[in-house]
Image (cartoon, helix red, strand yellow):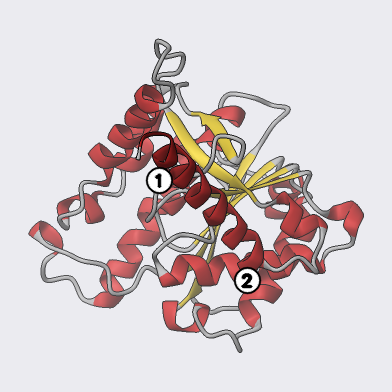
Amino acid sequence: MHLPHPDADIYVPEPGLDPDAALARTTHLCVGAHQDDIEIMAYHGIAECFGRRDKWFSGVVVTNGANSPRSGIYANYSDAEMQAVRVREQRKAACIGEYSIQLQLGYPAGSAKDPRQTAVTADLTAIFAAASAEVVYLHQPADKHDTHVAVLAHSLAALRALPPAQRPRRVLGCEVWRDLDWLGEADKQLLDVSAYPSVAAALVGVFDSQISGGKRYDLATAGRRLAHATYHAAHATDTHQGITWAMDLTPLVQNPALSVRDYTRAQVERFRQDVEDRLAKFF
């Protein structure tokens, strides 16, 4: 296991386990843009593997955590010091969630957003090939954060570069900076995140630099999951304690010729048509 960027970090929570072996046994893999994205968007995969020995979750963070907001005890931290804090926090989350391996690629966000940057795609291609995960969690194409969408682009390019037999059987685009409750019912991928609520809380809560920095991701993430569960069905009692929604991106990996823009536009169009049809009944 080698990551070329000088700021890259490799962490295996299980003592003595070789990183290559930790990556190879991965069944569920998430690629996030920033530290804490994984714990917000892919808790479904973490919970699926938690406490198991036949399923293993692994995480990849692409950027280095620079330019994050800071206050309180972190107010006077330099950017380099803050990056080091965020790397440590991500390692703590990997330990709490019993990840097989946590990789932090260390790229500046500007590099990740540069479409001419091929190193990120190359790193991800090598990781996907070595992991052979069954389920992959990515950012979703309707996200409003440029870095998230850029990391999605690198991730899809990497997955599409794999031989068809090595591509995951399921690829999900997940919520962070835009919810997916607007998706049509036939398009929504329901991810039950009810399990191990104390673990879920600890995973987001460990990123103290962000919470103390003025972003209550811990409360907001739990609240969104509960809200999705309650507002999922208007005429039925709640059947889940927490839900995150995802967009099925598997067709984009199975068919590399399929346009990401056209695929996303079609989802938006189905939402628009649903609203128009309902309004037409009464107006």
The foreground one among 259 and 155 is 259
Q: Residues within 10 Å of mark 1 (few under 14, many from 20)?
A: some
Q: x%, y% of residue 136?
A: 66, 48
Q: Is residue 197 above or below residue 152?
A: above
Q: What kind of residue is marked 1? A: Lys
Give the alpha-carbon distance from disc 2 to disc 1, as whole Å.
Answer: 26 Å
Q: Nearer the viewer, residue 237 or 154?
A: 237
Is 246 above or below relative to 231? below
Task: Specify the farthest residue to the bottom.
Answer: 116
Q: Nearer the viewer, residue 245 or 212?
A: 245
Please say whether residue 31 is visible from this viewpoint.
no
Q: Identify the residue at image location x=76%, y=58%.
A: 253
Asked whether residue 211 is in view, the answer is yes
- State which quarter of the image contains the C terminus: top left
Q: Residue sitting at 33 percent across and 69 percent down?
A: 83
In the image: residue 21, left or right of residue 231? right
The residue that label 1 is drawn on is 92
81 w.r.t. 183: above or below: below
| Nearest to viewer (mark 2 / mark 1) | 2
Q: Sequence-wise, which precedes: disc 2 or disc 1?
A: 1
Residue labelled with disc 2? 154
Q: Which mark is residue 192?
A: none
Q: Residue at x 79, y 66 (%)?
A: 256
Where in the figure is residue 128, as x and y percent of width and height?
Answer: 73, 58
Q: Residue at x 57, y 65 (%)?
A: 152
Say which element carries label 2: helix
